[in-house]
Amino acid sequence: MSSVSVVLCTFDGAEFLVPQLESLANQTRPPDEIVVRDDASHDATRQVLDDFARRSPVPVRITVNRRRLGIPANFWAAIGDARGDLIALCDQDDVWLPSRLERAVDVLDHDPQVGATFSNGRCIDERGTSTGRTLWGLAGLTDDLLARLRSGNELEVLLRRPLVTGATVTFRSSFLPLLVPAPPITHDYWISAAIALQARVEPIDETLISYRLHGANAIGLHRAAALPALVRYLRDRSLRQRTLTTQFHLRQALLERADRAADPLLPPATRQRIDRELDLLRFQLALPERFVRRLPRALRKVRSGAYASGAIGRFAWERDLFLL
């Protein structure tokens, strides 16, 4: 059986940290170690961690950063500290169900073609009360997308948008040479898409964590209804630029990793499609804000057929034409 490291990153998380730590200690398949990186917290987080480490039945290794690294850098530093065959990512404010680790390890140990797993979860509020939402519902992970993921089209599906919540991810540490150095996008999106270059990313259709939604969430899901979300995207230029930039960096990094591999990781048709999408993303990022200047350029791009693949999201050309 593979060894497994739980990687937990903390920052000013004392308010919700105790129930999460207790849920790690109560796993039906205990981790072999819990690796913690605290990002120079100002509250009682360190005391909570030290108290837990003293009574934990599982070895706990705590590193406190002298200065703040920020979420992505702190997660990658913590991942680099892990010694297990498998790495399970953990947020400070959630609660794991007892079978969270057991189910992930079982899938990975029984199928060597699977490089990473992720699961569904229920959303809870500050008090731990269910909101009635699920992670997959918020991410827009439909039955059709699930079927496509399971049919071996993980990369194609994940290129469209992030669907994997990092707090549910377990992956093989053998993929670290592929993953680092990471591009400037969220760690969970990069891990799921990059591993899909070489292996299967297996969805576990079970609720394995309680994912806490609260006003202090640093990153994660805050998905609104479809229409308000679209209106926000149209009106918020900085959000649009961040979304397009993420998609650009993701594709650029995937091509770089594919090129440095000894064996081809991308079929020629897939590589050509990603190259075309990169060209379109460069164009979108360079579009002027003023409608009168943007409209003729966008119309020419639409007529060229560059938006035809649809791989960078539905209604892409409509957004570029009518961005408010």
Image (tube, grey):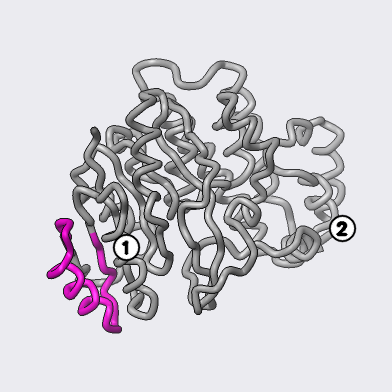
- Residue 299 percent location from the top left of the image: 86, 43
Q: What quarter of the picture does the N terminus occupy?
A: top left
Please state if 74 lies on the left or on the right of 158 as rendered: left
Q: Quadrant of residue 167?
A: bottom left
Mark 1, residue position: 9
Region of the chain picked out in magenta, as a range: 36-61
Where is 280 relative to 243, above or below? Answer: above
Secondary structure category for the residue under label 1? strand
Where is 55 relative to 295, above or below? Answer: below
- Residue 112 percent location from the top left of the image: 36, 24
Figure label count:
2
Mark 2, residue position: 292
Secondary structure category for the residue under label 2? helix
Please state if 124 lies on the left or on the right of 301 as rendered: left
Q: Nearer the viewer, residue 263 or 27?
A: 27
Q: Label 2: how many residues lie within 10 Å, few (<14), some (14-19) or many (20+)? A: few
Q: Which residue occupies 40% across, 33% down?
A: 107
Q: What quarter of the picture does the C terminus occupy?
A: bottom right
Dot placed on the residue nearer the N-terminal end, 1 or 2? 1
Q: Nearer the viewer, mark 1 or mark 2?
A: 1
Where is 293 relative to 93, above or below? Answer: above
